[in-house]
Image (cartoon, rainbow, N blue to C red):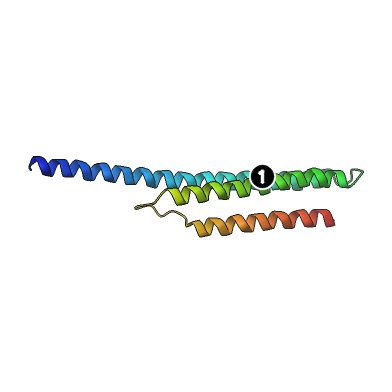
Amino acid sequence: MGKDDLAQERTDWAEDRTDWAEDRTRLAAERTFAGWVRTGLTAIVVALGLQAVFRPFEPTWMPKAVATAFLLTALVIFVAGWQEARRSCRAIDTHSADAQPLRRISVLSALLAIGTVGIGAVLWLL
């Protein structure tokens, strides 16, 4: 094996390691998005729990308003998570990892946002 072959082999390994690092970073961004989703869903659960516990409270609009604040927080969390995931997906290419496509992440984020607004509407109609 000549000097040029050894240099090329080292270059190939360096490129492979860089590709693997990019894959790991992209998959880490997916896990971060999942964390955003979990946090948003937790805010929804808190909103529903507050409404259930404080339903008999007078005036009736007060527990609804507090629950709505948590629902708005969930919306902000879902949008922020989607924006960060979109930024990561566009900035980092995958090589051998099977990452979630941006379209799927966007659809999931939109459905979560629509569901949160629906929960808010139902909350105020009760």
Residue 77: horizontal and vertical position, in percent?
63, 45
26 relative position to 96: left or right: right
Quadrant into which the C terminus falls: bottom right
Query: Which of these two is toward me, 79 or 17?
Result: 79
The three-letter amino acid code for the residue at tag 1 is Thr
Q: Residue at x 42, y 43 (%)?
A: 25
With 19 as the anchor, is 61 left or right in this view?
right
Please tell me which residue lies in front, 8 or 98.
8
SS for callout 1: helix
Q: Position of residue 66 (x, y in %)?
A: 80, 43
Q: Identify the image quadrant of residue 111.
A: bottom right
Rate crowding at label 1 as few (under 14), some (14 to 19) or many (20 or more) other CA atoms within 10 Å: some
Res. 49 in view: no
Quadrant where the N terminus lies?
top left
Residue 125 x %, y %: 84, 57
* Residue 9 vertical position relative to residue 123 in the rendered view, above or below: above
Vertical arrangement, residue 99 with respect to residue 17, above or below: below
Which residue is under mark 1?
A: 42
